[in-house]
């Protein structure tokens, strides 16, 4: 039996040649191609009409997608189907002799992934149906509150003045910069200071000195976009100082806001949060914020290096590029957490990371996101092993490295 026998597939690509190439190839593998076209709002509308028949979506992320961001966001928001994102730049099996660039091994690899996603979704759907039937039959279940709702209520988090400032950062409006800085200064003046006794100050200094001399062995990428500053703030506020990890924060922002974000996050975290500087060596207990204007990498020694080039693609910084660079250097010692955001930045490199190193890829749950399409995209690609609120993610990583008795105050 062919790998995709009887599986209903949807294909989106900005290239007519690639559309035709993929459609013909997958049909040879036994697939039924329900829809194959350019990714735009009309495509999403047509997909909604046949979503009950389709089983899996392949989106070819090429550079011709200049006006597809809105369509992709709409698709992630409205279509509840597993998605495989593909980009030739992340594919090590290419054939330049082929008109569309896909070699037969590459097509075979895509077919296997699509089949796995479709079957995984079928199993999840079956399990969800069985769970719903079990709940309906249960005498103790009164139907007044779903399990999902209970979890969400437990994870509620108050919105304070600081979170309002972080949300204003997302506007990326240069005219608001002075006003944001003024509000930040007011919040600093009104915020009560915590006074430590001499013993606590000495202990804090000892911990700081120890962390300062500890070159990072474990490095995690934090990828975030709209709603990200608040989510990352909540996450870092719950990270224990003893955690043997360093973080690289790739946050979509407007130019000029990186310093403000780093300063703001540094105030609430026991980790040192700072802008990335060329020559810095990443250490445990640190968070470096990736620059917007210039491409940055971390070498195998954890040293920050700037390249004489811009970030590739529509997003700055490119979360995909940051994940790819960090995971190439740190391999099994790397990890990824995708927070609130719009679009699908990060999913391509996460796929590669999962394939090569079976690394940890976690994501913020939809209920606690301002916009959930970015973490949803890695979930739909069947890459996420754990989802939770920012606070739950902090507890999860603490337990991962420090055991079940890890304490987060």
Image: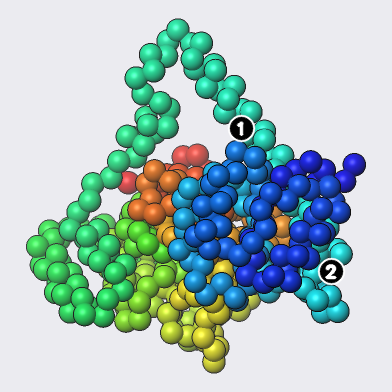
Q: Which residue lies at the image location 37% right of the left edge and 62% below the top edge?
A: 226
Dot 1: within a 10 Å radius of its alpha carbon, few (fewer than 14), some, or many (20 or more) residues? few
For disc 1, the marked residue is: 125
Q: Position of residue 3 (x, y in %)?
A: 84, 47
Q: Residue furthest right?
A: 1
- Work out how far the residue at label 1 is from the one at label 2, CA to CA, in angstroms: 33 Å
Which of the image's four quarters has the N terminus? top right
Q: Quadrant of residue 123?
A: top right
Q: Quadrant of residue 308?
A: bottom right
Name above or below for residue 51 compared with residue 333: above
Nearest the eye: 148 or 119: 119
Nearest the eye: 195 or 69: 69
For disc 2, the marked residue is: 103
Nearest the eye: 389 or 140: 140
User: Residue 67, labelled with which disc?
Assistant: none
Q: Position of residue 294 (x, y in %)?
A: 47, 85
Q: Which residue lies at the image location 65% right of the left edge and 44% below the top edge?
A: 54
Nearest the eye: 329 or 296: 296
Instruction: Note whether residue 79 is visible.
Output: yes
**Is disc 1 placed on a helix, strand or loop?**
helix
Q: Which residue lies at the image location 80% right of the left edge and 69% below the top edge?
A: 102
């Amino acid at each position: 039996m062919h790998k995709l026998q009887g599986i209903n597939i949807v294909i989106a690509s900005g290239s007519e040649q690639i559309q035709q190439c993929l459609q013909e190839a997958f049909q040879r593998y036994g697939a039924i191609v329900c829809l194959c076209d350019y990714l735009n709002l009309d495509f999403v509308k047509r997909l909604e009409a046949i979503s009950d028949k389709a089983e899996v979506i392949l989106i070819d992320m090429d550079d011709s997608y200049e006006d597809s961001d809105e369509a992709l966001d709409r698709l992630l928001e409205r279509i509840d189907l597993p998605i495989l994102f593909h980009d030739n730049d992340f594919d090590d099996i290419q054939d330049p002799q082929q008109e569309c660039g896909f070699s037969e091994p590459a097509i075979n690899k895509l077919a296997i992934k699509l089949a796995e996603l479709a079957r995984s979704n079928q199993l999840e759907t079956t399990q969800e149906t069985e769970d719903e039937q079990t709940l309906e039959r249960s005498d103790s279940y009164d139907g007044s509150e779903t399990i999902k709702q209970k979890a969400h209520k437990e994870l509620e988090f108050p919105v304070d003045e600081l979170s309002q400032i972080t949300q204003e950062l997302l506007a990326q409006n240069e005219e608001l910069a002075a006003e944001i800085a003024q509000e930040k200064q007011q919040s600093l003046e009104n915020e009560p200071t915590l006074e430590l006794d001499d013993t606590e100050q000495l202990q804090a200094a000892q911990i700081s000195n120890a962390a300062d001399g500890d070159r990072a062995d474990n490095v995690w990428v934090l990828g975030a976009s709209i709603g990200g500053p608040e989510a990352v703030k909540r996450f870092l506020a719950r990270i224990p100082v003893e955690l043997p990890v360093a973080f690289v924060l790739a946050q979509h922002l407007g130019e000029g806001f990186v310093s403000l974000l780093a300063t703001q996050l540094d105030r609430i975290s026991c980790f040192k949060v700072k802008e990335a500087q060329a020559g810095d060596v990443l250490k445990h207990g640190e968070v470096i914020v990736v620059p917007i204007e210039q491409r940055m990498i971390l070498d195998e020694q954890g040293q920050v290096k700037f390249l004489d080039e811009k970030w590739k693609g529509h997003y700055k910084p490119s979360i995909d590029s940051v994940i790819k660079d960090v995971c190439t250097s740190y391999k099994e010692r790397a990890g990824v957490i995708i927070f609130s955001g719009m679009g699908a930045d990060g999913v391509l490199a996460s796929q590669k990371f999962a394939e090569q190193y079976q690394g940890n890829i976690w994501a913020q749950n939809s209920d606690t996101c301002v916009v959930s399409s970015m973490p949803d995209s890695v979930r739909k690609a069947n890459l996420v092993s754990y989802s939770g609120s920012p606070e739950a993610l902090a507890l999860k990583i603490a337990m991962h490295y420090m055991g079940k008795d890890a304490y987060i105050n």
